Image (cartoon, rainbow, N blue to C red):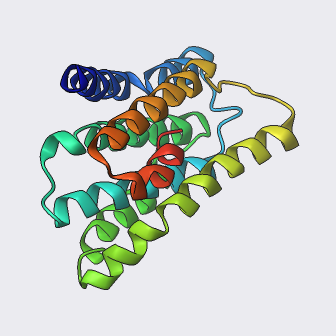
Amino acid sequence: METRLLWFCNWSVLGVCATLKLPQIFAVLGARSARGISLPSLLLELAGFLVFLRYQCYYEYPLLTYLEYPILVAQDLILLLCVFHFKGDVKQAAPYIVLCVSAWFILTLQKWIIDLAMNLCTFISAASKFAQLQYLWKSRDSGAVSAATWSLASYTCAGFSSTQIFQEQLAYIPAFQTERY
């Protein structure tokens, strides 16, 4: 029973993560506007995803334990390009993409760098959500923000928490729960 439930949690979270940002991307494309999307929030979220993905790769965890993160990074990069496109200049995304690629290599120059970055993931992710909520509060306009994306992210947190409880890896739950929103 426990094995089936764990299997369901793992695969359902992976499935939801594979489509997590698609409602947001489609909302931005449909509105032909990035109104309501906080660039700092998106960049912080992308940074958190990259750190977590790099950490998992660095310590050679099994691919199935972090398979959703390459998908989430790709979706965030697409969303970043959409935001810059609708703000008028896709070329402005280039420095951020270069920074992401550079960070991928810098994070593993020394073990303490990747460990410190992973420990900061919860803070980075919470800061991302706070930045988005603050932006929405100030602008008083949700624009192209997708409620479906936020709802799907809530499910991934619940599914991930149950997976970690079954695997008795409680130490990582706070980082993962904020990471996926």
Q: Nearer the viewer, residue 12 or 68?
A: 12
Q: Which image quarter: residue 56?
A: bottom left
Q: Nearer the viewer, residue 90 or 169?
A: 169
Task: Give the percent coordinates (x, y) of residue 92.
Answer: 50, 54
Task: Give the percent coordinates (x, y) of residue 26.
Answer: 49, 18
Q: Which image quarter: residue 22?
A: top left
Q: Could one spot residue 74 in this view of the protein?
A: no
Examine the rendered structure and indicate whether residue 66 appears above or below residue 13. Answer: below
Looking at the image, the residue that sits furthest to the front is 1
Is 33 left, or right, of 156 in this rendering? right
Task: Give the percent coordinates (x, y) of residue 35.
Answer: 70, 32
Q: Could one spot residue 89 in this view of the protein?
A: yes
Task: Give the percent coordinates (x, y) of residue 33.
Answer: 63, 27
Examine the rendered structure and indicate whether residue 85 appears above or below residue 109. Answer: above
Report the quarter where the N terminus lies.
top left
Name which residue lies at 28% across and 66% down. Answer: 104
For the image, the number of numbered tags is: 0
Report the quarter where the C terminus lies.
top right
Name which residue lies at 29% across and 63% down. Answer: 101
Name which residue lies at 66% across and 44% down. Answer: 38
Name which residue lies at 81% across and 29% down. Answer: 141
